[in-house]
Every structure is written in structure tokens, then in C-alpha cells.
């Protein structure tokens, strides 16, 4: 099992960071390795989404249950096991929390996952820190772009 937890201060409002992370349909526009995403079902504070990720010739997709709590600015994501889709993960869950801070927003993020393939699991472990940094940077860059465009929440 690979897990990672981090807290960082970003110079953007908590409401904006929550909006960026909760707008999953936009992920293919700015997140590396996300090649497609479709929302399968949605209500006010919950959605089921299928994400396709890829790197080089490798393409995989998986389905997640996404719980949104705009009041607490919290997002909880858990992979749904789907025998038809399979997917690269044996287990995947991640949690986000956005708290106002004097310098912008404190972002708390945690992820826990295990790949089905031992080979993929060992390869991912060696590149994991670089991948996490690139993904975090992509969310921050998206917030910066939206703020500059005047779409800040």
C-alpha cells in the first residue's frame, strides 16, 4: 500500500481551491495523465465519475465515488470496484480539506492506494513523489489561472 499525506499553504482562497478540486469534469484540461473523465451520476453532494488515465501507451480507467461537502470544504473520494472496468487499482482513496489561512488557504491532502499489478505498484512507488508534486502543482496552476481570469470563487 502506498500512502501520502501533506499539508501546504497556497496563496488562493479556500473556496477557490475547493471549486478547482470539486470540478472533476475539468480535470482532463489541466491534470497530467488524466485523458478523459465522465460523470456517471450526480446529485447535490455526491457524484460517481469514471476517469481514464494514461502515460505513453498505457491507458486505464476506474470509477470513483466522490463525496462533496461544500460547507466543510471537504472532498472524499473512494474507488468503486467494478468487475466490468477492472481498473489499475486494488484500492484507492483520497481526501481533501481546504481551510482559510492568513496567506490564502491551507490544503490538506491524503491518498492511499495499491495497484492490482505488482510491477505497476513497484514502478509507481519509485516515481510517486514526482507524480504527487506535478499533480499538486497542476491544481495550484489551475487556481491561479481562474483567479487571473476573474473566476475566483
Image: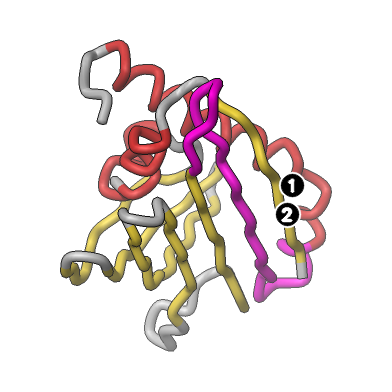
From the image, tell me which residue sits under label 2: 4
Residue at 37% from the left image edge and 66% from the top image edge: 66
Where residue 128 is drawn, which disc sits there? 1
- Classify 41 as above or below 70: below
Magenta residue check for 143: no
Towards the viewer: 66 or 45? 45
Q: Secondary structure at mark 2?
A: strand
Label 1 crowd (10 A; few <14 / some 14-19 / many >=20) = some
Determine whether, in the image, residue 149 is placed left or right of residue 30: left
Q: Position of residue 69 (x, y in %)?
A: 34, 61
Determine whether, in the image, residue 71 is placed left or right of residue 17: left
Determine whether, in the image, residue 100 is placed left or right of residue 4: left
State yes or no: discs 1 and 2 in contact (Cβ < 8 Å). yes
Q: Quadrant of residue 88?
A: bottom right
Residue at 54% from the left image edge and 60% from the top image edge: 95
Q: Secondary structure at mark 1?
A: helix
The outermost residue toward the front is: 102
What span is colored magenta in the figure? 99-121
What is the magenta segment's predominant secondary structure?
strand
Q: Pick whichever of labels 1 and 2 is earlier in the sequence.
A: 2
Amino acid at each position: 500500500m502506498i500512502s501520502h499525506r501533506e499539508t501546504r499553504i497556497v496563496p488562493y482562497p479556500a473556496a477557490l481551491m475547493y471549486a478547482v478540486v470539486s470540478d472533476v469534469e475539468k480535470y482532463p484540461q489541466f491534470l497530467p495523465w488524466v485523458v478523459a473523465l465522465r460523470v456517471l451520476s450526480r446529485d447535490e453532494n455526491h457524484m460517481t465519475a469514471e476517469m481514464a488515465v494514461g502515460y505513453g501507451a498505457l491507458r486505464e480507467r476506474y470509477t470513483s465515488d466522490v463525496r462533496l461537502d461544500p460547507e466543510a470544504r471537504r472532498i472524499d473520494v473512494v474507488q468503486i470496484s467494478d468487475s466490468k472496468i477492472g481498473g489499475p487499482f486494488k484500492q484507492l482513496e483520497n481526501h481533501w480539506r481546504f481551510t482559510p489561512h492568513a496567506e490564502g488557504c491551507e490544503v490538506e491532502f491524503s491518498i492511499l492506494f495499491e495497484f492490482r499489478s505488482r510491477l505497476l505498484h513497484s514502478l509507481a512507488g519509485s516515481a510517486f513523489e514526482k507524480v504527487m508534486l506535478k499533480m499538486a502543482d497542476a491544481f495550484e496552476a489551475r487556481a491561479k489561472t481562474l483567479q487571473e481570469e476573474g473566476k475566483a470563487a
